[in-house]
Amino acid sequence: MRSIPRPNCPVCGRTGRTRYESLQDRLFGAPGEWRMVACDDAACGTLWLDPAPLPEDLAEAYKDYYTHASDARPASGLRERVLATFGQRMLGYPPPAKPAPLLATMARALPRYRELAGFARLYLPYVAGGRVLDVGCGAGNQLAQLSRAGWTAEGLDLDPQAVAAVRARGLVARCGDLLQPDLPAAAYDAVTLVHVIEHLPEPALHLRAALRLLQPGGRLVVITPNVRALGHRLHGPDWRGLEPPRHLQLFTAAGLQTVLRDAGFTDVAVRSSARGGDENLAASAAIAAARRTGSNRSRGMRPNPVQRLLDAVERAGVMAGVDCGEELVGSARRAGG
């Protein structure tokens, strides 16, 4: 896989210093060794690959990627009913056809269910009859959630196989990215980028394109790994969130706020989320084990009791306002409306 120099921070433009060297893809076996640098401005804190894969060669890093996997759960399932009830309470969604108010009330104290409920609706306040574009939709799992919740949902993905999988589910998707000139301006009430922005060679350019697609007052939601995550602090170069060479940059809360504001968004808010902490901790431990044995593929691991305890610590920290969750959830609006 060919590479190109990338000496400047994709958020603030400063130079960086080496944070990790000789990183390998121990998740999906993409070739090469990679260097990740940290922005010289500690307040920015962005990490990025330098050098990075040549854009024309990036497809090689996704040959065995997981985005084709479908998760077509029935809408009437108990889990869906609990999450839908939370979604209605938290974000103004219509109540589900089969509500589970007692279960939802009992689960209100559980941070994990609150996070799942927010993610099930992608943290989007409901817009009756609203139109949403899910960028990097993969096989359409999130798209299906949004459609069931009442949105007019459309997907966008560069991978034609992923788009075909979405269409096979009876959902709407097109092949391409946000830079396509034929995407309709001011046509969407919401645009979502869930674990997408870290994959983009020019994130600022794509965010400005997303702004163009939103109606005045429309909302953008960005979910991405958090540089300050507890998992990163514990596992360093083996942290699941690094994922070289697919993750071209990783943000702190301050860095994500900056790149959203610089793209022209208003009402920018970024917070830490502990969703998936136990799974990320287990995956990080598996990556470390693969590195020690020289393997280019880590074996899947279920969270063990220690990792579940650390997950509980991470969730408690997030609830207390500590920036330690595995993900950042960024929300912003286009001015007007």
Image (tube, rainbow, N blue to C red):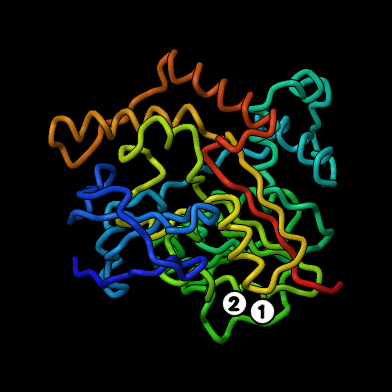
Answer with left or right where residue 13 lies relative to residue 332.
left
**Residue occupying the point 84% across, 59% down:** 128
Answer with left or right where residue 114 lies relative to residue 95.
left
Which quadrant, please, contains the C terminus?
bottom right
Which quadrant, please, contains the N terminus?
bottom left
Asked if residue 59 shows in the view, the reply is no
Answer with left or right where residue 307 lies relative to residue 184.
left
Residue type at numbered disc 1 = Arg
Determine which residue is flagged by label 2: 209
Residue 95 vs 21, above or below: the answer is above
Front in this rendered view, residue 282 or 266 = 266
- In percent of width and height, residue 99 lies at 81, 31
Answer with left or right where residue 161 lies relative to residue 153.
left
Quick one: label 1, few (<14), some, or many (20+) residues within 10 Å? some
**Residue occupying the point 57% across, 51% down:** 223
Determine which residue is flagged by label 1: 212
- In percent of width and height, residue 34 lies at 24, 55
Front in this rendered view, residue 304 or 16 = 16
